[in-house]
Image (spheres, rainbow, N blue to C red):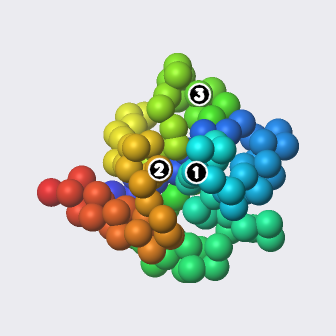
């Protein structure tokens, strides 16, 4: 793997707002009230899920987690369809997993499998 590659997991919520806490609580309700499926999959009231943390440490590609406003500021992307997973290659970004795909995922295990599959496809 190339050292300048980074996985970007981008939430559909802004940082520093109470929406992150609200999103977690909404995730226990119906899917219609859920604002960020990625956040709900990965985060508990006490932090990132342990199994997901282990998955990330086993990956050869480093990862970052960005909120909507951080992503827009850093990459100048207007109105991105989020949540999504991108791979950053230098200054370029490539979408690996779309919002529609994330919204259909029910567990961190499913997300981990899809991340691994897409990384393999990316490097072919």
Between tags 3 and 1, which lies in front?
1
Residue 72 left/right relative to 114? right
Label pair 1/2, CB-CB below 8 angstroms = yes
Q: Residue drawn 59% across and 74% down?
A: 53
Element at label 1: helix
**Label 2 neighbourhood size at 10 Å, few (<14), some (14-19), many (20+)?**
some
Earlier sequence position, callout 1 versus callout 2: 1
Q: From the viewer's perspective, is 121 left or right of 76?
A: left
Q: Are marks 2 and 3 in contact (CB under 8 Å)?
A: no
Q: CA distance from mark 3 to mark 1?
A: 25 Å
Q: Is residue 53 visible?
A: yes
Mark 3 closeness class: few <14, some 14–19, many ≥20 residues within 10 Å: some
Whether residue 67 is visible: no
N-terminal-most mark, 3 or 1? 1
Q: Which residue is mark 1?
A: 31
- Residue 50, by quadrant, is bottom right
Q: Which residue is mark 2?
A: 103
Residue 65 located left or right of residue 117: right
Q: Nearer the viewer, mark 1 or mark 2?
A: 1
Image mark for residue 111: none
Q: Which residue is mark 3?
A: 72
Residue furthest left as drawn: 124
Which of the two discs, 2 and 3, labels the residue nearer the N terminus? 3
Mark 1 burial class by Cα count in 10 Å: few <14, some 14-19, many 20+: few
The count of marks equals 3
**Whole-percent x and y of residue 95?**
36, 41
Q: CA distance from mark 1 to mark 2?
A: 9 Å
């Amino acid at each position: 793997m190339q050292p300048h590659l980074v996985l970007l997991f981008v939430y559909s919520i802004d940082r520093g707002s109470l929406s992150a806490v609200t999103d977690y609580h909404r995730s226990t309700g119906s899917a219609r009230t859920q604002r960020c499926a990625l956040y709900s999959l990965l985060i508990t009231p006490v932090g990132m899920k342990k199994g997901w943390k282990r998955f990330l440490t086993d990956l050869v590609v480093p990862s970052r987690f960005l909120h909507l406003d951080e992503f827009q500021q850093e990459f100048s992307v207007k109105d991105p369809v989020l949540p999504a997973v991108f791979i950053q290659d230098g200054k370029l970004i490539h979408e690996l997993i779309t919002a529609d795909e994330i919204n259909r995922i029910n567990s961190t295990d499913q997300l981990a499998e899809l991340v691994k599959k897409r990384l393999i496809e990316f490097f072919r």
